[in-house]
Amino acid sequence: MCLCRLVDNIFPEDPEEGLVKANMEKLTFFALSAPEKLDRIAAYLSERLTRELNRHRYGYVCIAMEAMEQLLLACHCQSINLLVESFLSTLRLLLEADKPHLHILATNSFVKFANIEEDTPSYHRSYDFFVSRFSEMCHSDHEDLDTRNKIRVSGIRGLQGVVRKTVDDELQVNIWEPRHMEQIVPALLVNLHGLFSAFPSLFSGSPAEQTEVCFRELLCRAAYGHINNAIKPVLMHLDSHSLWQGRGFAVQCFQIIMYSIQSQHSHLVIQQLLGHLDANSRSPASVRAGIVEVLSEAAVIEATGSVGPTVLEVFNTLLRQLRQSVDYQLTGYYDNAGKHKTSSIEEKKLQDAVIKTIGSFANTLPIYQRSEVMLFIMGKIPVPGIYPALGSPNSGFEGSRMIQVMLLKSLLQVSEHYESSNLLTALPSSFLEPLLSFTLMEDPEIRLLVLSILTLLIDRRHNASRLTTASLAFDVSSLEMKEDRCSRQDNLFMRKHAQRLYRHVYLASREENSGRSHYQALFTLLAVLSVELANEEVVVDLIRLILALQVDRTSECLSVFNRCGIHALCAAFLNLLSQLGPPPTLHQHITQVIESREKDAPHLLPEVVFCDKPRLPEGELKVDEALLFIQSKICEALAGSSYSTHCERFNTPYTPQLTEEDRLSKRKSIGDAVSLQVDMELPFCPDTPQTEQITFETLKNAIEDRGVVEEEERRKRMEVVERFQTAPFEEIAAHCGARTSLLQSKLNQVFELIIRPPPSPSGHSAPRSTPVYEMKFPDLCVY
């Protein structure tokens, strides 16, 4: 009876007067003095609140809740569990009522309770009702906008309190279970969507801040095994509300996620997105593009250099999306049934997004993994004659060409920020050879992409951006030059791959469908080679290459623009090369030829050819010898310098060899350009003897064929030189070893004839003596 009187005394006659503080202090002192009676105090307070609630006396309801809150704050000790059950049951009554202000009152009380740190565990407490009710409040659609916003904000704060109360207590309900996450996460995302513009500022901050803080707090507490349960409802919400399209809510949502979770768990989000992308492979292009855009932004944030244990699987998924997009673009449908149409514009947007995402992922990787990624992408590109049908069987040649372009663009994205001090590791043979084979393709876009990729990988001092325009007025001082001579690794790279690079530059410059951008790209590549890898031998070989380009008679089949472009390319590059180290006399000769062209043939200069409206001569192009760079004068200019030791190489004009790549490229222009170098010897069968009658015509033909024989001998000499320059060391060693064995066998035969004794007069052969070179002498006899 005394306990009930103490409780009743805290209620004033007029509820507007509020809690009677003096009597509340007495009740608090009594509860602390006799903690075993807390459960009776809480039960009576709950009974009194229920009675007042049924009578709609909401003022006394607020007083009862305030009393419970003060008791909770005062009694946070081992006996607090006696009070909590009645407190939570009272909150359920308020939340089940149909009055919004009671919902807000209950939420505020729950938040105060959630902030209390308990020392003793509780085994029978359940928060399932509160998760469900607070999530429901977040979806409130009350008629009054202000009331609706207050209810939603209260729901957000209530969920935040549930998370704080349960996430660190293993004995409480597991808040990370899918059934709870499927209620909490969508409730938060609904309030994040809409840019929070409809909410007024309440409580300690605006609703936007409150929602984002709650979402971040939820994610930052997620352990490794909880990430998937927290991310899956996000993906489902974005799917069900069609929020992937455009650069909007989906990107902002995952930015919050990536910045909130622990960094070592970031790759789990990436894997979830990749799996969701595969699951939506039959969705519209706008949905797939939205997921890819989110992946790109997530990769930028996830900058720790790890995208999970399976790095290549990330790129494999993205490349698979590229191939599927090409198939959809060609067929016009994004499903096998042919019911859902798609457009080329939408698919191209998706392809651009995938290529950008590949670059974003590659930029987060260390250098050695980027090399693996480049090799992986190169292995996916269809090569003519080797991988002709990488895509769908229905895509055909056009599909393979589109896939080639897309994958080369992806490779270009990976190469943009690739920096390696050792070109032998950056451009291994397994990567360089298939890449160079694409310079022989007929498609001009493919050739331009390959030239750009090569330039980016070789350009370690970032000079390519300064060398994008072939001009005679170029300022060499603006380049970032190397301070010392080429390193040993660079010299080994050039010895191994230089002739292959020169050959592809030579052939790429003679393409009929090359435009201004191709000649600009060739100039940039040659200039970067000169700045990064040039030594005396490389400079001489580059000059030989340019001299061969300007005098090749097979270029007469090209258009006037292409021939003028080749001459302009030669002039621009030699003008630059002559300022990078050779003697000044070389630059004087180059300047004299350029001045002669300015007077008599301006159409052979880059400023006239590589412009929007090139001024080309009408009719057939004729170039006087005075307008060409002369080999003899170049040799004289290099005499007396460190380059003079390599000047004898000028005696052998540069001619590229025809290789297996030309057959695989299926291009007639390459075969025509180097047709004189093809070995057309027919097999000879000795089984049937043939006799030829010698006539006057036979002798005449033999005399006329003398020039052909000389050309054949010169070709064989060139093959020997090129073999020793380009062939692997093992092949050269095996070839020389075979010749050495043959020579040794011949010497043994000669020795046997020399030491053979003369025949005996009796007719009997003398006993065969041991060869001198096989006799073993005592050690004392050897000096």
Image: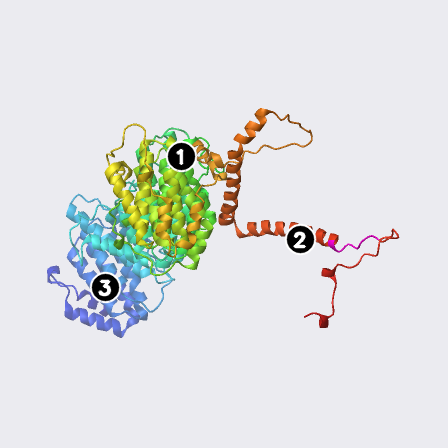
Q: Amino acid at mark 3?
A: Met
Q: Nearer the viewer, mark 2 or mark 3?
A: 2
Q: Which SS class for mark 2?
A: helix
Could you give the CA–CA distance between mark 1 and mark 3, rounded to whole angstroms?
101 Å
Label 2 crowd (10 A; few <14 / some 14-19 / many >=20)? few
Which corner quadrant holds the N terminus? Answer: bottom left
Towards the viewer: 285 or 506: 506
What whole-number distance in Å separates the C-alpha atoms at marks 2 and 3?
A: 109 Å
Quadrant (top left/top right/bottom left/bottom right) for the C terminus: bottom right
The residue that label 3 is drawn on is 68
Amino acid tagged 1: Arg
Quarter of image, res 616: top left
Q: Nearer the viewer, residue 49 or 586?
A: 586
Dominant SS type (magenta): loop
Q: Nearer the viewer, residue 211 or 415?
A: 415
Magenta segment, which residues?
A: 754-759
What residue did someone put label 2 on? 744
Answer yes or no: do the residues labelled 1 and 2 have beta carbons within 8 Å? Answer: no
Point out residue 373 in the picture as x, y percentages from the top left corner: 42, 49
Q: Which mark is residue 553?
A: 1
> Distance from label 1 to label 2 (Cα)?
46 Å
Callout 1 crowding tier (Cα within 10 Å): few <14, some 14–19, many ≥20:
few
Q: Where is residue 368 drawn, in percent x and y? A: 42, 55
Residue 677 in the image, given as x and y percentages of width and height: 49, 37
Report whether 177 appears left or right of 8. right
> In the image, which is nearer the foreground, mark 1 or mark 3?
1
